[in-house]
Image (spheres, rainbow, N blue to C red):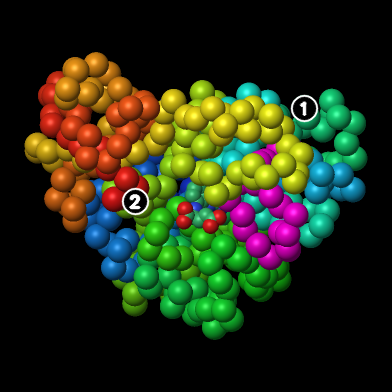
Amino acid sequence: MTLSNLKMSRRIRRTPFTDKVEWHGVTGFTVVNHTLLPKSFQNTVEEDYWHLRDKVQIWDVGCQRQVQISGPDAKKLVQWITPRDLTRAIPGKCLYVPLITEDAGFINDPVLLKLSESKYWLSIADSDVLLWVRGLALGAKLKVEIIEPDVWPLAIQGPKAVHVMAEVFGSRVRDIKFFNFDWFDFEDSKQLIARSGYSKQGGFEIYLQGSKYGSRLWEKIFEAGIKYDIRPGSPNIIERIEAGLLSYGNEMTIQDNPLECGLDKYCDLSDQIEYIGKKKLHSIAKNGLTKRIRGVRFTGKPMAACSIPWPVMSKATNKTIGKITSGIYSPRLKMNIGLSMIQKDHWDPGTKVLVQTEHGKVINGEICSLPF
Ligand code: THG
């Protein structure tokens, strides 16, 4: 299958797995970090959803690009860019870290991997973190090297992922704890494998180092997975919304802060550490929020995925009080569900609302807490 809509060029980067994804008959891509992310294969998003909950899938998430920060000032720089307290972080740990501006606006929400005291990878969502941190390092005259290394995550997700991974890398993969990583042999290389991924169905991410191994790594895993009914897939929008996993650029942008996104537990407000945006974040915490991320569930026919934000109105006043930024029908909950930023005075669970979809309908709904 070739691409019909997206006109390719060098600016839209392939990953070491794109050849395999095309071989499997990918039917659509999106672009994240200027890199292809497969979105669909032959099955519907609902079929993929049930399969992910029951079996195992292999996802080309090479678009989760790495920003590598190393050198004598690496530790200082990494702590400076996030409100999360990294004082006790040890090598072998993955940490979900909000990155914010001096105004506490969201820059990105990467997974941080601490490789050593002086070497880190930021596994980024969709924004140009490399430029931000290189600018900071230059301005502050820090002794660091900041590059995008030849590292490309490949996710193995679903309840059967652990069996497939054990066949390829040995049973030691079973010992990796959630949000930890360890090193494993692949051919003549050492590869980092983490227990993580953009789903709540369990699984692993292999941070493939060395593009040349890409096709063979994919083939090895796929072959081992056949008896577990492995399929090529991609982050599933139904599963992600149900789980309340946020997507940078969709649920939040530089206009939002991590407290509004419900990420308080990743923000240190104790004044023990220094970071960009600290003063502003403290003042926001003190003065209270004006909007928050919430779930919205709404009735009516099964909705196709939201591709532009859907306004949410108060049922009492008909005024717009927020927007659904990712929404779709959940076949398990048997209702439409959405992630939304909702204004103060309207965000209490149970608040009755109206949802204006891009399909021209106005539908009754209700605010709820997350996850669904
Ligand atoms: N994996 C890797 N890189 C990534 C993502 C990923 N970069 C972009 C994007 N996804 C970043 N966003 C998230 C959002 C949530 C989680 C991971 C990345 C996540 N959160 C867990 C949770 O919410 O339960 C745990 C967080 C924690 O305990 O620290 O998994 O998926 N490599």
Query: Residue at horizontal 20%, vertical 29%?
Result: 353
Front residue of 132 and 281: 281
Closer to us: 125 or 73: 73
Asked if residue 91 lies in the magenta stretch, the reply is yes
Task: Judge by depth and name the residue closer to the eye, 90 or 161.
Answer: 90
Q: Which residue is mark 2?
A: 371
Q: Local crowd at mark 1 within 10 Å, few (<14), some, or many (≥20)? A: few
List x then y, in percent, for residue 331: 17, 52
Question: From the viewer's perspective, is 119 left or right of 326?
Answer: right
The verdict on residue 169 being magenta is no
Majority secondary structure of the magenta segment?
loop
Q: Amino acid at mark 1?
A: Gly
Q: In the current view of this chain or complex, which residue is farthest to the front?
A: 286
Observer able to see residue 40: no
Under circle 1, the secondary element is: helix
Query: Mark 1 sits on what residue?
Result: 135
* Viewer-side residue, 37 vs 194: 194
Q: Is mark 1 within 8 Å of ligand 1?
A: no
Q: Based on the displayed image, in which of its 4 quarters is residue 337 positioned? A: top left
| Residue 181 placement, left or right of 255 | right
**Residue that lies at the very extreme toward the bottom in this rendered image:** 171
User: Residue at point 73% right, 59% down?
Assistant: 88
Instruction: Name the N-terminal-most of marks 2 and 1.
Output: 1
**Where in the figure is residue 270, as x and y percent of width and height?**
68, 45
Q: Secondary structure at mark 2?
A: loop
- Segment tinted magenta in the rendering: 80-97
At a point 53% along the width and 37% down the height, the residue shown is 258
Q: Specify whether 348 is left or right of 77.
A: left
Q: Residue 138: percent from the left, percent from the top?
A: 84, 28
In the displayed structure, would residue 197 be above or below residue 344? below
Q: Is residue 103 above or below residue 213?
A: above
